[in-house]
Amino acid sequence: MRSLIDILDLSAEEIDELIQTADDIIAHPDKYSEACKGKKIATLFFEPSTRTRLSFEAAMLELGGSVIGFSGAQNSSAAKGESVADTAKVISCYADIIAMRHPKEGAPYVASINASIPVINAGDGGHNHPTQTLADLFTIYREKGSLSNLTVGICGDLKFGRTVHSLINALARYEGIRFVLISPEELALPEYVKSDVLEERNIPYTETTDLEGVMGDLDILYMTRVQKERFFNEEDYLRLKDSYILEPKKLKNAKPDMIIMHPLPRVNEISVAVDDDPRACYFKQVLNGKYIRMALIMKLLKEASK
């Protein structure tokens, strides 16, 4: 049974195919309005979420399917001690596909090997968030026309940011990608990502603590929030949470066609004054996420029916 747990579960060709399908959904929505008629998605969210959960639900509804699920571990049998494996087996009796978010790394993988239906990882701890990466890639494609030959600045929490790790893994497979990694030293990209992905593939990257100093080099600026829920103590979080705040004046040296991205939710790392800048693409990312999830749901259900 095909599931999506890690962005690397998809080949670059499959990502390109999903992007083309999502593009076609935008152009011809009526063509897809009954693509999943009679099918149900179960959204199993053991951790809070607004965009991701509602994006999956909106995606399935717009494909003519229906939705069941819960939005908190306290609202499920996990509160009684049920294992993820048992939950996956139970939900397989009720739904055709699962989207799962869980605070523990590896939980969606455990679900996928126990479920008899496809499982999509909707975020597991600080580990992976492959459908956010698909939304990011689709946004880059829509705005830049290509996923190649780009200088990508990633700013903020590079240590715990699951969206960051997934995006680097995905973009590393395209030609001419260069990364500029901008963070406090305490939140730098983990060594294993640098060695296993960037150095292994000979992808050029630089590390800096100075956002404004590199702004003029970037085709894409991917901002992230410092995530309180990933810190072991409040003192470290309070010290680092405002490390980078993007304001209009910091964009004065940016390229006119640079795009500003953010997986959201933002706290205060992008000033609301930036929202009116034509380069701001983070709300477009949200919309693009719905379309690419529609493409993914259709792909996995089609493969499951073979």
Image (tube, rainbow, N blue to C red):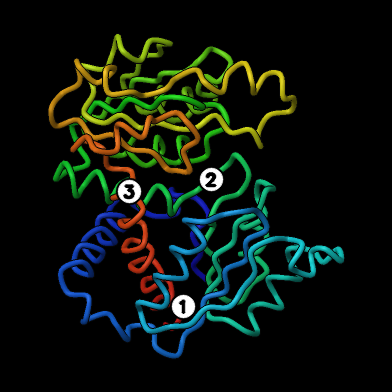
**Residue 27 position in % (x across, y down):** 15, 69
- Per the image, label 2 sits on a secondary structure element best described as loop
Residue type highlighted by circle 1: Ala
Q: Circle 1 sits on which residue?
A: 304
Give the side of residue 183 with respect to residue 106, left or right: left
Mark nearer the N terminus (3 vs 2): 2
The reply to whether the C-beta atoms of the residues labelled 3 and 2 are less than 8 Å apart is no
Residue type highlighted by circle 3: Phe
Q: Circle 2 sits on which residue?
A: 128
CA separation in Å, label 3 and label 1 = 32 Å
Nearer to us: label 3 or label 1: 3
CA separation in Å, label 1 and label 2 = 23 Å
CA separation in Å, label 3 and label 2 = 21 Å
Residue type highlighted by circle 2: Asn
Q: In the depicted view, which residue is nearer to us: 241 or 261?
A: 241
Residue drawn at x 41%, y 75% is: 303
Residue drawn at x 36%, y 56% is: 289
Asked if residue 282 is positioned above or below residue 253 in the image, the reply reads below
**Residue 306 position in % (x across, y down):** 42, 82
Q: Circle 3 sits on which residue?
A: 283
Give the side of residue 112 with respect to residue 248, left or right: right
**Residue 251 position in % (x across, y down):** 24, 21
Total tally of numbered discs in the picture: 3
- Per the image, label 3 sits on a secondary structure element best described as helix
Mark nearer the N terminus (3 vs 1): 3
Q: In the depicted view, which residue is nearer to us: 126 or 289?
A: 289
